[in-house]
Structure formats: structure tokens, C-alpha cells
Image: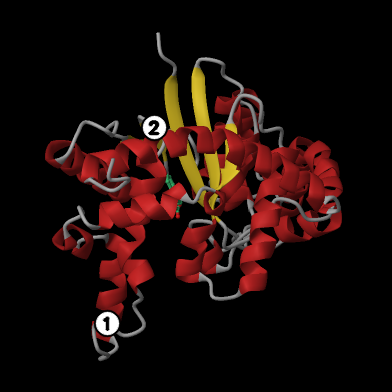
Amino acid sequence: MAKQRILTGITTTGTPHLGNYVGAIRPSIAASRDSSIDSFFFMADYHALIKAQDPALVRQSSKEIAATWLALGLDTEQAVFYRQSDIPEIPELTWVLCCNAAKGLMNRAHAYKAAVQANEEAGEDPDYAITMGLFSYPVLMAADILMFNAGKIPVGRDQVQHVEMARDIAQRFNHNFAEVFTLPEAVVDDNVAVLQGLDGRKMSKSYNNTIPLFQSEKQLRKSINKIKTNLLEPGEPKNPDDSTVFQVWSAFASEQETARMRREFDNGIAWGEAKKQLFELVNSEIAPARQRYEELMSDPGHIESVLQAGAQRAREHSSALMQKVRAAVGIGPIS
Ligand code: TRP
């Protein structure tokens, strides 16, 4: 039986945080070790240009993200791990798909619609500061996905619409030209926690409420101490279900340890003590990788060689697929 192929991308615009780890990195790395799954993971650096106009930031983020995935034990023999911009067929396919994607479909993309709405609310021109990059974002993402004939696309809820658009674009192409593309499906894992950040909202770089994954022990302890709590005193029972401390705890703890912490909350554990235990728990899971992360960050040549090897494997697929696409649409040599 053919292996199931999964693919997902990580936009290179920030420093990986605990929310990225729990929501995407940890489950993806587990999948990379499952020999019944054929996985493709890549750094979406062309996507980063949509949001970030700071070259140093894009460069630094790519390095940090690659080092993070490697430090945490991504199996790069099994998984194909590469950088989007190392695959020239991706922008090439993007153009072909642009010529097939309905503009009306793109008008409905959430990220674009939100930007238009924000402009309207601010009394600006609806197109104010909206680039073609933002508008075409779902087409680039469709190219990422369709290039590798991936069937399952693990993403967060906010990305489901984009995967559906990729499916739509693929269907249209297959119908108009030739059956070239596998139809992709988004996979949202409800068992994976969406982590809360310091202020209790979803942990996200855009809310500036994250706990970076690899900071020194001392800084990690400090970050955890900044998690917002209420004013209940030691000895007063606390509600675990409205507590970020407990929510983060349960993303790292076993079922048993989670049940124990629930009892501790009932018994009025002090916030300081709960945070101390949380630090110990999180730190024990990531400390071994932190060491490796630091080594990798000081050896960028090694990271680069791993990415080049990944790109080479990815291009075996992408160059073959692109040949089919060119042939299907009538681009290529005359004889
Ligand atoms: N747009 C995705 C995000 O911001 C990242 C991404 C780019 C992606 N290309 C992809 C995810 C292809 C899955 C498949 O999260």
C-alpha cells in the first residue's frame, strides 16, 4: 500500500514559541518518526515576505526555525525537510495556478478580507497597503501543497480555508487540462492543544504574549512567572479550567500528572508553587533539545547542508511534477 503523504509549511516570521511547539512541531516530529507516513515539512520563506519586510528578521527566523526542528529530533532521513525558496518550481507553479485560480475565490480569503475590512473601518481606501502578495497568498500555498501530491495537510483552524482553496484550484486544473494533482485535505487535530499565552489569549506572535521555546532556563522561569493569574491566596481553591498555568501544564503533563495538578488546584496550591512546578515540567521536556539548539545555532553551515540535502530530495518530486504541468498547459519545446 502507498504511504500516506502529509505536508506542512512554517512561515519564517518569528521565533518558535511553546504554542508552535505543542500545536505543530511536536506532532509533526512524531509523524516524521512514523514509517507508515511520508512527510514533507518546509520553511515557507516566500510566505514570510507577505508579512515581513525586514530581511534580517526573515533570515534569522529561518535559521531559528530550522535549528528548532533539528534540535527537537526531526528525522530528516524519513521526512523531507526543505526551504520553499530552494524549490524554483514552486514560484513557477504559482504562476500557472494564478492563471487558473478564480479571482472571486481569492476575494473570499479570510486574511485578505480582514485587511480590507480593517481599511474600511479606518475610513481608508479598501486596497490601502494591500499587496498582491497578500491577495495571492492562497495560490502560493496551493503550489506548495499540489507540488508534492500531498493528501493530508496538518494545519491550524485558521489555515483550513487555504487548503480548501488549494483543493478547488487542483480540481479546476485537473478538469481543464489533465489529472495532474492529488486533491488535498486539511487535517485539524482536536487533541492538539491550542496553547494560551501570557495574557490568556491564544499564544501568538501577533499578540506579543508568547513564551519562546528556547531561551535560557532563567528566562524561561521568568516568562512562566509572567503568566497572568488572579489574586486568590495560597490555600484558596482555584479553578483549573480558567487558568493558563493549568492549560499549559496539561499540554506537557501525562494524564496522571494532570489529574494530580487538578487536585492541587482544588486544594489551593499557591500560584508561585504552581508556576514553579510548571517551569520544572516544561524545562525537563525541552532542556536536552536546548543544548542541541545552541550547538546548531552556532553551526549554520551544518543547518544549511541539511537543508540542501532536503532540497535535493524535494526537487526530484517537484521537477517531475512541473514537467507534467508544463506539458499539460502547452509550455515547452516545439518538438
Ligand atoms: N500559511 C501557513 C501558515 O501561515 C504556512 C504554509 C505555507 C503552509 N504553505 C503551506 C501550511 C502549505 C500548509 C501547507 O501557517
Identify residue type, mark 1: Asp
* Alpha carbon distance from label 1 to label 2: 34 Å
Horizontal arrangement in the rendering, residue 73 relative to residue 92 (left or right)? right
Q: Residue at 63% of width from left, 53% of height from top?
A: 17
**Badge 1 density bin: few <14, some 14–19, many ≥20, Cα 10 Å:** few
* Pick the front one: 13 or 289: 13
Horizontal arrangement in the rendering, residue 173 relative to residue 277 (left or right)? left
Q: Where is 174 relative to 242, above or below? A: above
Q: Residue at 25% of width from left, 68% of height from top?
A: 113
Q: Is residue 5 visible?
A: yes
Image quadrant in which the N terminus is located = top left
Q: Residue at 72% of width from left, 50% of height from top?
A: 275
Image quadrant in which the C terminus is located = top left
Q: Is residue 262 visible?
A: no
Q: Residue 272 location in percent, x, y? A: 75, 54
Identify residue type, mark 2: Ala
Which image quadrant is residue 282 in?
Answer: top right
Q: Which residue is situated farthest in the front direction here?
A: 335
Q: Where is 271 relative to 114, above or below? A: above
- Secondary structure at numbered mark 1: loop
Which of the numbered marks, if any, corresponds to residue 150?
Answer: 2
* Pick the front one: 187 or 137: 137
Q: Is mark 2 within 8 Å of ligand 1?
A: yes
Which image quadrant is residue 153 in?
Answer: top left
Residue wearing tag 1: 127
